[in-house]
Amino acid sequence: MEKEIKQIESEIATAIKGDSTANPAPLGLMGFGMTTVLLNLHNSGIFELGSMILAMGIFYGGIAQVIAGIMEWKKGNTFGTTAFTSYGLFWFSLVALIVMPKIGLSIPPNNLAMVAYLLMWGIFTGVLFIGTLKLNRALQFIFASLTLLFLLLALGDLTNNPTLKHIAGYEGIICGFSAVYAGLAQVLNEVYGKTVLPV
C-alpha cells in the first residue's frame, strides 16, 4: 500500500511540474528542410539522384520526422504530430517509389500516377497551411511554399516539361531552407532565452 501511495504521489508531482520534455519541432523541421534542399538540388538539375538523397530520405527526412511526430503526440500537439509523422512517411514512400522498381518489386509509376501522388500531397499540405494561419510566419511560409512545390512538381510530371521541373527544384530549395531556418531559430532562441532569429 505504501508503495502505491508513493507511486501516486510521484505521478501527481510530475503532473504538477508539467511537461519537461524537449521541443521536437527543430528536429522535425531540420529533417524535412535539409532533405528537401538536397532533393531539390537534384530536381533543379545540379546533380543526379543517388544514394545520398535516398539515405537522407530514409534516415533524416523519414525516421527523424516520425520520431519528432511521436514526440509532438506526447506533448498533445495534433498539428505537429500530423505534419511531422506524415512528411516522415512521405519520405519513406518516395524512396520506396524509386527503389521498389529497381529491385523488381513493382513497376515504376507512370507520369499520371506521379501527378496523382504529388497532387494528394499538395492538397494535404494546402489544408495544413490553413492551420498555420493561427501559428507563426515562418511556418506559414514553409507550408505555402511546400504547397506550391507539390503543385509545380505535379505540373512538371503532367506536362513532362524539364524547365518546369527545374523551376520547381529552385522553389523547393527555398522551401527547404525556410524550414532549416525555422528549426535552427527555435534552437538558438531557446539556448539564448531570447529572440536571436525571429519566427
Image: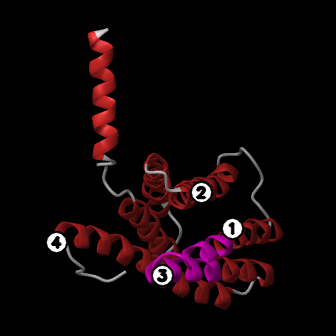
Is residue 34 magenta-colored? no
Instruction: Say if 66 sits above or below 112 in the image.
Output: above
Which residue is painted at 58% across and 53% down in the image? 89
Question: As shown in the figure, which amino acid type bears the numbered disc 3?
Answer: Ile
Compute the Cα span from label 4 to label 2.
31 Å
Nearer-N-terminus badge (1/3): 1
Nearer-N-terminus badge (4/2): 2
Instruction: Say if 33 sits above or below 145 in the image.
Output: above
Q: Residues within 10 Å of mark 2 (few under 14, many from 20)?
A: some
Instruction: Specify the segment rendered in magenta.
Output: 126-149
Question: As shown in the figure, which amino acid type bears the numbered disc 4?
Answer: Tyr
Q: Position of residue 41 (x, y in %)?
A: 48, 78
Screen quadrant of the C terminus: bottom left
Give the SS element for disc 3. Answer: helix
Nearer-N-terminus badge (2/3): 2
From the viewer's perspective, is the residue at label 4 or at label 2 nearer?
4
Point out which mark residue 192 bears: 4
Residue on which disc 2 sits: 86
Residue on which disc 3 sits: 173
Q: Tell whether label 2 touches label 4 (CB within 8 Å).
A: no
Q: Residues within 10 Å of mark 3 (few under 14, many from 20)?
A: many
User: Is residue 45 visible from the viewing direction of this image?
Assistant: no
